[in-house]
Amino acid sequence: MDKVLLEQYILDSKKIAIIVEKNLFLDGKIERLFLPNNRPHINEYRKSKEIRESYQKFMKENLLSEYPFEINSIYKKILKLDENPLVQGIINLNIDGILKKNNAKNVIDLEGNINWLYCSNCGSESSMESFVLNQDEIICKNCNDNSLKVNIPFNGQEPSQWDFKDSWMLMNSCDCLIILTADFISPITFSFIDMVTKKHNKVIFSGNLIDFRQGNTPAFFSDSHFISSIDDFLDIILELINNRYS
Ligand SMILES: [Zn+2]
């Protein structure tokens, strides 16, 4: 896809949806820490104080050097897109929670958000940052119980059905889907691409290198792939959509 076609796609669109693929922060370090296979089973987590303690320690030890999370240039640009009226919504597959923490309004954290924990005993919330920076204490400050759980689905838990419904509605209402991809495309993204292309709406991929081993290369891929870094791509998109509102 060349720049002329990219410009045409953006200028013709009235409702843009964006999918932010995984691994856009710290080269995927946070995603790898919280891979689904490393997460406890929810029933065991509820039952066993030892399992809770060991997982909480694991989070504290591994996140200590990363907090406070520093927002990167890609997220800064996504936050600018979030404010533009052409952008209907953003599905975020990263779990670092930085976009929401920086007041993103139209972002769906479809795979969860590690930026806060809730106590399954009393329901009170703690921020992950304060939890991690206070290395000594792993109990809920409100009820002195150690039932704090990070806000991502554990094994045996379903992701939020509301977020799925919101995502489907977004895919049904957009006329252009932009996918920001670091290196690969998730299976869930393929299902969203299917929804959009069945309605003959446009899809744009950005990124230098995309590995399709997790799914088939879409037939229209070469017509939709704008080869560039995500940073450069976002600069182009921001300029195009800001011009339409100036
Ligand atoms: Zn509590």
Image (cartoon, rainbow, N blue to C red):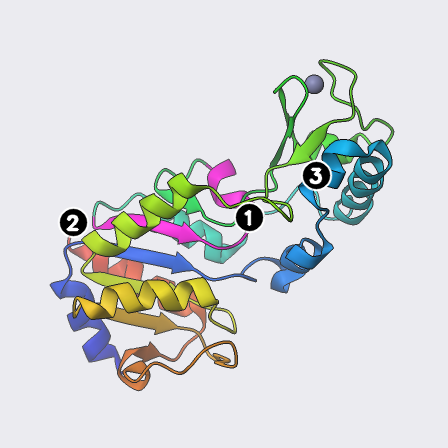
Q: From the image, tell me which residue sits under label 3.
A: 43
Q: From the image, tell me which residue sits under label 2.
A: 245
Q: How many marks on residues?
A: 3
- Residue 231 spot, x, y in % from top left: 44, 65
Q: Which amino acid type is shown beneath numbered disc 2?
A: Tyr
Residue 117 is inside the magenta segment: no
Q: Where 217 sits versus 103, above or below? A: below
Which badge, 1 or 3, comes first in the chain's sequence? 3
Q: From the image, tell me which residue sits under label 1.
A: 71
User: Which element is circle 2 on?
Assistant: loop
Which badge, 2 or 1, comes first in the chain's sequence? 1
Front position in the image: 128 or 199: 199
Residue 96 is inside the magenta segment: yes
User: Which element is circle 1 on?
Assistant: loop
Q: Which amino acid type is shown beneath numbered disc 3?
A: Asn
Going by the image, does 142 lie left or right of 151? right
Magenta highlight range: 86-102
Residue sitting at x 55%, y 48%:
71
- Residue 167 spot, x, y in % from top left: 34, 49
Which badge, 3 or 2, comes first in the chain's sequence? 3
Ligand 1 quadrant assignment: top right
Q: Is mark 3 within 8 Å of ligand 1?
A: no
Q: Residues within 10 Å of mark 3 (few under 14, many from 20)?
A: few
Q: Nearer the viewer, mark 3 or mark 2?
A: 3
Q: Are marks 3 and 2 in contact (CB under 8 Å)?
A: no
